[in-house]
């Protein structure tokens, strides 16, 4: 019809030009099939349609028609309704997984993203990726483990704010973690002990300069100048006893693998905790253990070299005696020591001059002398010191010498006496 406009792609325009040349016998249909990379029978069909319908004969017959495999409007409405009620802040990829797991609805990720974008959901928009310099992974499993603590409202107000102590192997992406109430020396020691008992002792640990992992300048100066300790934090000292190399990162970007892991967990794990209605740290750790099984199964990758550099872990008792706070105190003549402003009595004889106090991750305290555990008890009723009061003020010599007289050699100097109460 006159005035009709045909919209064609570049591919269809090229096809039309070659088909017309074949109709005009400037090239053969066999040559046209070779140029268009289609069969000779398909060329014959297109030639027949062009002769009957004109130029629009090269346009695909299904253009403008609805796809017979399209998702029905009822399913689309159900997906949007469920997403708005349960998965409103989920990304498209994670939402597709949960729709398949809980709602038994299987749709494509890009299909859902297109629907959400049409509805105006912010979660459907892709985040711009920042430019980062690529660093080659370690070659062996267990060669280096990145470790850090993530402070986040993991329970979304249903319970206390928790800290996730996370570990990720640099070569294989294997993840381990556990929730604690705070980030410090004891949580670091307890989580590292659990990691060693499960996977073995790694060759090195890559962590930041948190005060629990590295002494600050003031403490380091005190240790070096006064000879107390060796300038290591308690956690560094424990890893040194286990012969584990400690590598400190001086920026978050340097340990980007663990930081990206936390970004993923703060999105996915938070929602898993929400779906499980976790309210306590115990429930959160149970959900975390189940989640990490699926996470490692899905995202685990093969190391460049087929060898496991994890060393066999010592026994749990040995780890308890290494991964603990240690401090030495002089033993007094009455077999007492002072630790953390508390007085302790050693209940058995020992010839040592110093007692090593160990604070274990479970909160227990142990007194050790030359590798042997000693019996002790805390003294609660300590004697109260009496205060010393002066009966009168001290008078200096010029106040007690009479006017007009000089102090001779034989004249004794009279002073006020002090009376103690």
Image (tube, grey):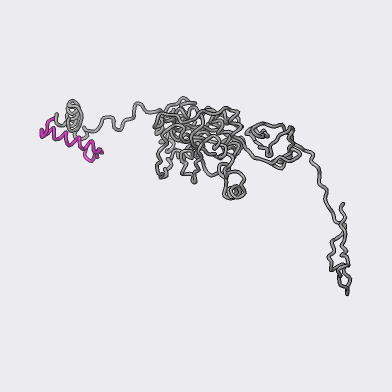
Q: Is residue 46 left or right of residue 297?
A: left
Q: Outermost residue, left direction?
A: 25
| Image spot of residue 264 (x, y percent) | 48, 36
Residue 126 on image: x %, y %: 42, 40
Q: Would residue 365 be seen by someone viewing this image from the given angle? A: no
Going 79% across and 41% down the picture, which residue do you hit? Answer: 382
* Residue that extends furthest to the bottom in the rendered view of this protein: 404
**In the image, residue 9 lies in the stretch drawn in magenta:** yes
Q: Which residues are magenta?
A: 1-29
Going 73% across and 33% down the picture, which residue do you hit? 349
* Of 268 and 227, the residue lying toward us: 227
Q: Is 177 colored magenta in this rendering?
A: no
Q: Quadrant of residue 112?
A: top left
Say which quarter of the image contains residue 37.
top left
Q: Position of residue 389 (x, y in %)?
A: 84, 54
- Residue drawn at the location 88% of the way across and 55% of the way down: 419
In the rendered structure, the answer to whether residue 138 lies left or right of residue 375 reads left
Query: The N terminus lies in which quarter of the figure?
Result: top left
Q: Which of the 4 quarters of the picture holds residue 414?
A: bottom right
- When the figure is inspected, residue 412 is found, relative to residue 419, above or below; the finding is below
Q: Is residue 182 visible?
A: yes
Q: Is residue 401 left or right of residue 118?
A: right
């Amino acid at each position: 019809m006159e005035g009709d406009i045909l919209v064609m792609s570049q591919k269809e325009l090229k096809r039309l030009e070659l088909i017309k040349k074949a109709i005009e016998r400037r090239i053969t249909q066999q040559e046209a099939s070779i140029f268009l990379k289609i069969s000779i029978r398909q060329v014959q069909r297109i030639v027949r349609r062009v002769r009957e319908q004109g130029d629009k004969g090269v346009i695909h017959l299904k253009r403008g028609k609805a796809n017979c495999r399209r998702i029905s409007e009822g399913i689309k409405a159900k997906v949007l309704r469920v997403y708005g009620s349960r998965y409103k802040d989920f990304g498209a990829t994670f939402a597709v997984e949960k729709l398949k797991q809980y709602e038994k609805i299987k749709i494509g990720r890009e299909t859902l993203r297109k629907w959400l974008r049409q509805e105006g959901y912010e979660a459907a928009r892709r985040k711009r990726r920042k430019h980062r310099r690529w660093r080659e992974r370690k070659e062996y499993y267990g060669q280096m483990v990145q470790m850090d603590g993530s402070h986040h409202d993991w329970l979304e107000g249903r319970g206390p704010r928790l800290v996730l102590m996370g570990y990720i192997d640099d070569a294989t992406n294997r993840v381990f973690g556990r929730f604690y109430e705070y980030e410090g020396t004891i949580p670091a020691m307890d989580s590292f002990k659990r990691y060693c008992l499960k996977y073995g002792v790694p060759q090195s640990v890559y962590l930041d300069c948190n005060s629990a992992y590295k002494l600050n300048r003031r403490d380091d100066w005190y240790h070096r100048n006064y000879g107390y300790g060796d300038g290591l934090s308690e956690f560094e000292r424990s890893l040194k006893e286990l012969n584990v190399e400690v590598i400190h990162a001086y920026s978050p970007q340097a340990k980007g693998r663990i930081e990206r892991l936390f970004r993923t967990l703060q999105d996915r794990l938070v929602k898993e905790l929400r779906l499980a209605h976790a309210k306590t740290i115990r429930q959160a750790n149970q959900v975390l253990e189940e989640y990490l099984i699926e996470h490692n199964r899905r995202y685990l990758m093969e190391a460049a070299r087929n060898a496991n550099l994890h060393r066999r872990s010592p026994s749990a008792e040995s780890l308890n005696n290494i991964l603990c706070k240690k401090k030495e105190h002089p033993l007094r003549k009455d077999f007492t020591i002072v630790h953390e402003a508390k007085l302790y009595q050693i209940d058995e004889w020992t010839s040592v001059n110093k007692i090593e106090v160990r604070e274990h991750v479970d909160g227990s305290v142990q007194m050790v002398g030359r590798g042997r555990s000693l019996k002790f008890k805390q003294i609660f009723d300590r004697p109260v010191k009496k205060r010393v009061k002066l009966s009168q003020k001290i008078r200096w010599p010029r106040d007690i010498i009479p006017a007009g007289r000089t102090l001779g050699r034989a004249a004794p100097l009279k002073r006020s006496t002090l009376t103690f109460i």
